[in-house]
Image (spheres, rainbow, N blue to C red):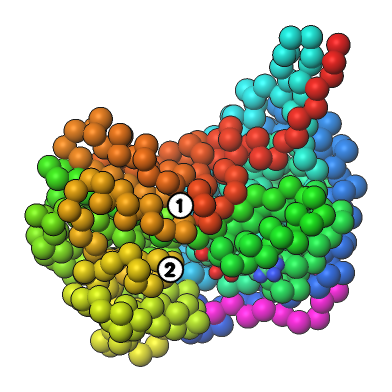
Amino acid sequence: MNAHDEVFIGGHWRPAAGTDDIKVINPANEQVIGSVPAGSAADVDAAVNAARSALPGWAATAPDRRAELLTALSVELAACQDQMASLITAEVGTTIGFSRRVQAGLPVNMTRLHAELVADFAFEERVGSSLVLLEPVGVVGAITPWNYPLHQIVCKVVPALAAGCTVVLKPAELAPLSAQMFTECVAAAGFPAGVFNLVTGTGAEAGEALVRHPGVDMISFTGSTSVGKHIGAVASAEVKRVALELGGKSANVILPGADLAQAVRVNVADVMRNAGQSCNALTRTLVHADDYEEAIRIAVEEIASYIPGDPADPDCRMGPVVSSTQRGKVRDHMRRGVAEGARLVVGGPEAPEGRDKGYYIRPTIFADVTTEMSIAREEIFGPVLSFMRYEDEGDALRIVNDSEYGLAGAVWAADEDRAITFARSMECGQVAVNGGAYNPLAPFGGYKQSGVGRELGKHGLMEFLQTKSLQL
Ligand code: NAD
């Protein structure tokens, strides 16, 4: 795809009012691969106006018809899946196999499943003498990050459109090309003009203008906790609805008697995928004192197969991180870990051998990490695993919950009931029990400073609906 030098407003690509552009860089070789307009407040205003004009017609469109158009969108996304995967590999540095399956593949399924969901969803119910109606919230401003750029867009735009809302999307500045390809798919699927609009741009200008715009009824944001707090405060001051999907510091708890080798291998794979840039990455590994050194030995053996390399090579298991800034942040975290007394087992802040171009990081394991250390508390967003030792289950639970974050987690035990009992006490929004698989219809979102609200499935759809009762 050639990058558009335009924004998509009211059903057309058109020149942006903002005159700056944003260069997109391939993190594997530091080459510029395209550029997109840095939309201004005037572009956001035009897009919100288009979304407001389209709202009455779209909100009144029968859910079956909305489902048909979303199904058409899933067909368009499937048709460009390979192209999309290559594009995201070039924008973000995700290894190509994972890009095909997850970055480009998962959103196809997600869109289809949510089309089916809305076709069967009960938008009305009787409660005694009342008729309770679920109506669209209105115009949604969607602001997304770069780590799973298409997935994060689909998690917001698809349920918002399914609910009968209209949307203005402001994607991440590091990965806007996949947002443009998504927009091509929306256009090809045949949605009415103005139902979906795209304004590329910076957070400080286009993002801020969207959050402050009086014509926006709801902001749905995925990104860092610091930006989320700011957006939440600004949008709430105008009593806009706000949904926030923020950072995480998720724990993997291996209880005595669990299959240690499997639990550690799955954990290493989980943190290495997308070079550690997953909000729900299991970056704190909690192991009982008796199994602790053996778990670290298994992890060291496992991590050796993750050799940083060209993500476009189908045999590569780990690419670079997304940007030079991100690489700098990850290395700073590593240096602080060493300074605070954690044991650096493998990896570290030096550049990997033979990788003088590209934003590569050494896959890293720290041991003897304790709850007060910054590497146990702060989101690193890189391929870094911290091992923490516990003495008994009470101790493990205290460590898990001693976090400002509460996005996700995992627990392993010989007996599923014991694992479920432990999972019930974990303060987070999603827990994988003995390696339980990701479910695209299960609600996803955080406790504590990991966010407000839930995405996906019926809970995700409800985020974009408001309730009215008719007293009969
Ligand atoms: P970020 O917060 O820097 O940026 C996210 C988006 O917000 C971008 O589009 C950016 O342009 C925009 N933005 C920045 N400042 C803004 C402002 N003042 N007003 C409006 N918009 C603004 O995050 P990032 O670096 O792109 O993404 C990484 C973060 O996202 C990590 O913390 C990760 O954990 C989190 N994340 C969370 C989830 C989840 O579902 N909970 C999923 C993926 C990523």
Most foreground residue, 236 or 46 = 236
Q: How far across and how far down the image is residue 239, in percent?
A: 80, 50
Kindly identify which numbered label has been placed on residue 457: none
For badge 1, the amino acid type reads Gly
Specify the quadrant that holds the N terminus.
bottom right
Within the image, what quadrant is residue 269 found in? bottom left
Task: Residue 378: give its label.
Answer: 2
Q: Can residue 311 be seen in this view?
A: no
Observer-nearest residue: 383 or 76?
A: 383
Q: Horizontally, is 398 left or right of 344 in the view? A: right
Asked which quadrant contains residue 285, the reply is bottom left
Left or right, residue 272 beside residue 91: left
Residue 11 on the magenta span: no
**Residue 16 coordinates in the image, percent (x, y):** 82, 72
For disc 2, the neighbor class at 10 Å (few under 14, some 14 to 19, many from 20) is some
The mark nearer the N terminus, 2 or 1, is: 2
* CA neighbours of label 1 inside 10 A, class few (<14), some (14 to 19), many (20+): many
Q: Where is residue 467 in the image (x, y as percent from the top left)?
A: 76, 30
Residue of label 1:
406
Q: Which residue is at a point 85% across and 15% down the rendered structure image?
A: 471
Magenta extent: 13-25
Label 2, label 1: how far apart the Cα atoms are: 12 Å
Q: Give the structural element (helix, strand or loop) at label 2.
A: loop
